[in-house]
Image: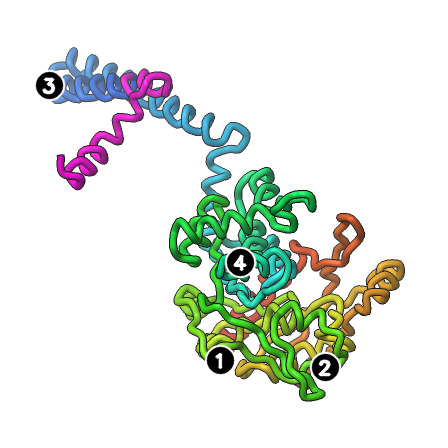
Amino acid sequence: MDKKLKKKILQLLKPLKWFYPGMGVKRWYLFSFIGIVIIVTGSLFLSNPAKVNQIFGAGFLFLGIAILIVGINRVILTFTTVLSPKDELVDLIFQKRHLERGLKIVTIGGGTGLSTLLEGLKQYTNNITAIVTVADEGGSSGKLRREFDVLPPGDIRNCLVALADTSPLMEELFQYRFDEKSTLSGHSFGNIFILAMSRVAKDFEEAVKQSSKILAIRGQVVPSTLNNVRLVAELEDGTTTRGENLITERSNPSPIKKLYLEPAHCEPTKSALEAIKNADAIVLGPGSLYTSIIPNLLVDSMTEAINSSPAPKICVCNIMTQHGETDGYEASKHIKGILKNTKIDKIDYCVVNNANIPKQLADRYAGEKAHQVIADVDNVKKLGVTPIEDNIITTLIKDKEYIRHNPRKLAKTIIDIISIAKTEAAHRET
């Protein structure tokens, strides 16, 4: 039999699966069908002007409608009991439709900072696009990149998990890291999975899409480029450091003067450019300034697309400085770092934390040569950027205590900024 014909026949027969034994719906289909037959019978009686036929017709009509309602109700109840035993179907449908109509938000960055923001934003909209750097060369991602010549999956994995709408067990599985005694020491299951998927799909971007389906994410995660790029930093003392991990771990204390990618020209992904074009807001960060955010903006045509977009450009400033990247940086210097190293021509808003972190934590971070970023809002304003100050921090406890952005508070701040920007734009038009 011809394959196309066989496929068509199978598609035609697919609805018959509902009649498999044990499905629990056949009786209610039959019940509903009987209701329809009775309704039709009642309609025929009503078409006869004789009084007795009118009485019988009305009786049959009401009986048929009642039977049909019960049958349909039982079919729906069977579906909802299987698909959602704990939640009301109407609530789930409302939530899904509400999120599908949500704002179109593009986030640009990488690392744990970006994934924290995504966790909060997915409560407001399904229309999220996370554009993620592929310049990572450290840890598990770096090992897989060198051994299998694959784009680094680590930052992408973190963003997928952050946007996931699956069970906590699936999220935990993707983040599971093999112990030191294993030959897979240091690797996470999610990284291995994306690597395997890229081999099966023979395309890294497609591998990310298929992984997104498995995790049922709200939105999409796309690499900024599919080219195998390396990040290069030119330091103030004239020396050069190649490789994202070496830039952050270098012993040379000289500040970063300039960043660029090798090869010099790399193509952005179409998905990234399309998302930027249709965005209601473009958010830069949070994340490592020089190794997570800026590398995305060095990809050809990326900044041109951002500059052409009428959407507000929002920079989320880090809470703490990062040794080797932003030593001694205030909020304004983070903005200057973006404007100096990229072709971005304007940032509209900058979200900065104005709450002090606990002294005990501040002292521990100081031991790691990291300090709280000062919210120098006056200098931010001088750059033509509107500062948005708020207490947007929380503590995260794993093996030790960390300071992180509060996902819920940060996402709410972003949504409020978009609302403000839309109001201001409407006033300008009038």
Q: Amino acid at mark 1?
A: Ala
Stretch of the chain drawn in magenta? 1-30
Which mark sits nearer the N-terminus, 2 or 3?
3
- In the rendered structure, are the residues bearing label 2 and label 1 in contact, judged by CB atoms less than 8 Å apart? no
Q: CA distance from mark 1 to mark 3?
A: 85 Å
**Residue designated by label 4:** 147
Mark 4 vs mark 3, foreground winner is 4
Amino acid type for the residue under numbered disc 2:
Pro
Main SS of the magenta part reads: helix
For badge 3, the amino acid type reads Asn
Q: Separation of disc 4 and disc 3 at Cα?
A: 83 Å
Residue shown at 85% from the left, 63% from the top: 362
> Which label number is shown at residue 48?
3
Q: Residue at x 57, y 74 (%)?
A: 231
Residue labelled with disc 2: 255
Tell me which corner region of the image, top left, top right, bottom left or bottom right, holds residue 237: bottom right
Disc 2 from disc 3: Cα separation? 94 Å
